[in-house]
Amino acid sequence: RVTKEVDSTSKEAKAFLKQQEKRQSAAPASFPTVSGVKRPSGMSSLLGKIGSKKQKMSTLEKSKLDWENFKEEEGIVEELAIHNRGKDGYIERKAFLERVDHRQFEIERDIRLSRMKP
C-alpha cells in the first residue's frame, strides 16, 4: 500500500475525492444487511478524510509526477516516444545486447560440445 500526500485543493485530491464518492455510492449495495455491520457514514467520513491528514507522496511518485509535468510543459512527449522506438533507444540497445550475448553463448556451447565428443 502506498500513501501519497497532496494538497487538498490540487486536481489529484479532487479526482481522488470524486472517486471515493463513486465508491461510497456503489458500496452500500454491496454491503450485507446483517445487523452489527457498520457502514461508513457518507459526508462525515468524507469530511474526516479531507480535514484529518494529507496523503503522503513517495519520492518516486513525486519524481514521476514532476517528469510527466515537465514532458507536457516542454511538449517533448512525442519526441521521446519516437526516439525510444529508434535504434538509439534504451530498449532496442538492451534487446540487441541480449541477442549478441545469446549468440555468443551458443557459439561457445557448440565449441565445448564438439571438443567433448572425441
Image (cartoon, rainbow, N blue to C red):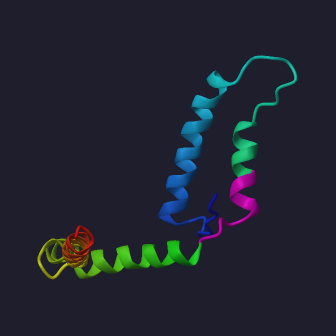
Closer to the camera, 76 or 105? Answer: 105
- At x 58%, y 41%, the residue is 21
- Count of numbered badges drawn on the protein: 0
Q: Which residues lie in the magenta part?
A: 48-57
Where, by quadrant of the figure, is residue 115 drawn? Answer: bottom left
Closer to the camera, 44 or 93? Answer: 93
Q: Quadrant of the C terminus?
A: bottom left
Look at the picture and state if 29 lies above or below 24: above
The spot of residue 43 in percent (x, y) is 70, 42
On the picture, is 48 further left or further right than 26? right
- At x 65%, y 69%, the residue is 56
Look at the picture and state if 28 lies above or below 96: above
The spot of residue 5 in percent (x, y) is 63, 69
Q: Quadrant of the N terminus?
A: bottom right
Closer to the camera, 32 or 18? Answer: 32
The spot of residue 117 in percent (x, y) is 23, 67
- Name the residue at the right extreme: 36
- Name the residue at the front extreme: 118
Where, by quadrant of the figure, is residue 96 drawn? Answer: bottom left
The spot of residue 81 in percent (x, y) is 19, 71
Residue 56 lies within the magenta run: yes
- At x 52%, y 66%, the residue is 10
- At x 12%, y 75%, the residue is 86
On the picture, is 70 further left or further right than 102? right
Look at the picture and state if 32 lies above or below 50: above
Where, by quadrant of the figure, is residue 64 drawn? Answer: bottom left
Residue 32 lies within the magenta run: no
